Structure formats: C-alpha cells, structure tokens
Image: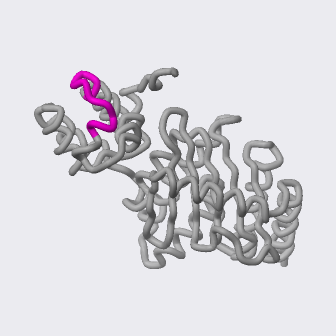
Amino acid sequence: MPGPKPLDPSSSPRAMLGAELRHKREEAGLTQEELGRPLFVSGSFIGQLEAGTRRMQMEYAVKIDEILETDGYFARNCEAATKSKYPDHFAEAAEAEAIATAIREYAPQLVPGLLQTEAYARAVFRAYQPTATEDVIDKLVAARLDRTHLLDDPTKPLMWAVLDEAVLRREAGGPAVMAEALWHVAALGRKHRIIVQVLPFSAGAHAVMGGALKLMAFDDAPPLAYFEGPGTGLLEDDPATVSRYELAYDLVGASALSPQQSLALIESVAEDYAHEDQP
C-alpha cells in the first residue's frame, strides 16, 4: 500500500501545520487513531488535518501541543492558518474545495459559486446584503471570482453540477445578467470542462430536497460533504453520513436530464432572457 502523499509545507499555513503535525506524530510513534483518541476525534480526522483538507481549530491545537510536547507550536501558528477571506461558515469548505480532485454539487436555487459570472455574483451578494457598502460587495465578489480559477486547469478538479430548474428560472440581476450567467455555464459544459445536468420541476420530490449539497473527493484523505443554508454551513466527514449523501446525489443525477438535454435547456432559457432584455 502506498504511503501518504508528500505535503508541500510552503503552499499555505494550513499545509505547514499539517506537514508538521504528521512529522511530530510519527516522531512520537503514534498512529492517527492514537492521536485522535484523546482529542475525541477519529483517525481519519487527524489524517485530514495532516493532508490540509480540514482546518485546525484552536482547541485541538492546544491539546496537540500537550500530547506531542511541542511547546505551543500548534497554538501559536493556528491563528494564521485559520485566517480566511471567506465567511466563517464557508471558509473551511472553500479551503477543502481548493485541493479536491473531484467536486460534485447539487444547487437548488443559485448557480454554484465556481460557475458564477461577476455580474451574477454581484447581484447575489447585493441581495444577501442590501445595505452593505460597495467596498464590502467588491471584496465578496473578488473572493468568489478567485474561486472560479480552480477551473482554469483543463481537467482538474472534476466538476459535476446538478442544477435544479429553479436555478435557471430564478432571475438574479435582470435578464441580461441571467443570460450571461447561463451561457457561461453552458459554455463550460460544451467545452467538456464540467458535467452539468438540470433537475426539472417535473422530477417532483427527490433525495436532496433539504438544501445545497457539495461532495468533495481527495487523493490522500477521505471524502467530505458540505451542506449550506443562509449564513450557515456544515462540513461533514463521518463516513456513513458522506456515503448516504453520495447515494442521494447519485439518485438526483439519475432523475435529472441528460447532459446534452440539460445544455439544450440551459441555452434555451438563456436565449429567452436575452430576448427579454431587448427593447
């Protein structure tokens, strides 16, 4: 069985902490399960900290310093590693997303963040925060657009999105903004950069009616599931829970239109918005 993937400590403060944690744990002769036990977390959680797919919280950093006798190293560096330009409820998911090898997402209301255009993102953030200053909105939009560069690589990560038909029909920013947003999604699909499906209203009840769902897979860490609601989010690593939502996602995909049918519908709705925008 191959050993763990080498880490690049220079890539981020969190990667630095992960690399040091692995080094100190192995130096102490502990397995991931043995280190996790006094922290009341699983061995896979320790593996995710070491791989950089999970953020190290201060409570864990303090306890790890005690167990590994690292003289406060992890507590001192934890604050820098947990700073983020993203909202608190999404920061850990965004950081995991950046190193995922595959991302599968069900979007019930909005175009997924990785697929948004600037104008669409701006309209969404303005709806979320109607009284915010332009500087605040600009920063939020910039952070979202920065995430979209994950798709600059022609093949990685694999991106598969299932859009509820409501995503196409719920107008954000006006007809011109919607037309641009949907054409952008369709273009990514036509270039084979993403797989996109539409779950039509006619599909009726389905397995992920509770809200948005993102599944992330990694080369050297267990998969994660992320659930998001207004101003809140939950990153889940329990294997049974993740497996259950992987099945739910598969069921939604099975109920959705085929990729070709989906692209045709997305482009048709985009055309309707474009015509609506004409005088």
Task: Give the x, y percent position of residue 78.
Answer: 25, 43
Rendered image coloring scheme: one colour
Residue sitting nearer the eye, 132 or 8 = 8
Task: Give the x, y percent position of residue 52.
Answer: 40, 38
Look at the image and tell me whether residue 134 can be seen.
Answer: yes
Our reading of the magenta stretch's main secondary structure is helix
Up-down: is 156 above or below 248? above
- Quarter of the rendering containing residue 121: bottom right
Which residue is painted at 69% across and 50% down in the image?
Answer: 160
Task: Give the x, y percent position of residue 4.
Answer: 45, 25
Which residue is painted at 83% across and 62% down in the image?
Answer: 257
Up-down: is 246 above or below 107? above
Task: Give the x, y percent position of residue 130.
Answer: 48, 78
Q: Can residue 194 be found in the magenta stretch?
A: no
Up-down: is 190 above or below 264? above
Q: Can residue 33 be found in the magenta stretch?
A: yes
Which residue is painted at 70% across and 72% down in the image?
Answer: 206
Residue sitting nearer the eye, 171 or 132 = 171
Q: Quadrant of the C terminus?
A: bottom right
Which residue is painted at 37% across and 27% down in the image?
Answer: 10
Q: Is residue 152 left or right of residue 236?
A: right
Q: Is residue 189 left or right of residue 227?
A: right
Residue sitting nearer the eye, 259 or 278 = 259
Q: Is residue 151 left or right of residue 279?
A: left
- Quarter of the rendering containing residue 170: bottom right
Q: Is residue 54 left or right of residue 164?
A: left
- Quarter of the rendering containing residue 213: bottom right
Look at the image and tell me whether residue 116 can be seen.
Answer: no
Specify the segment rendered in magenta: 25-35
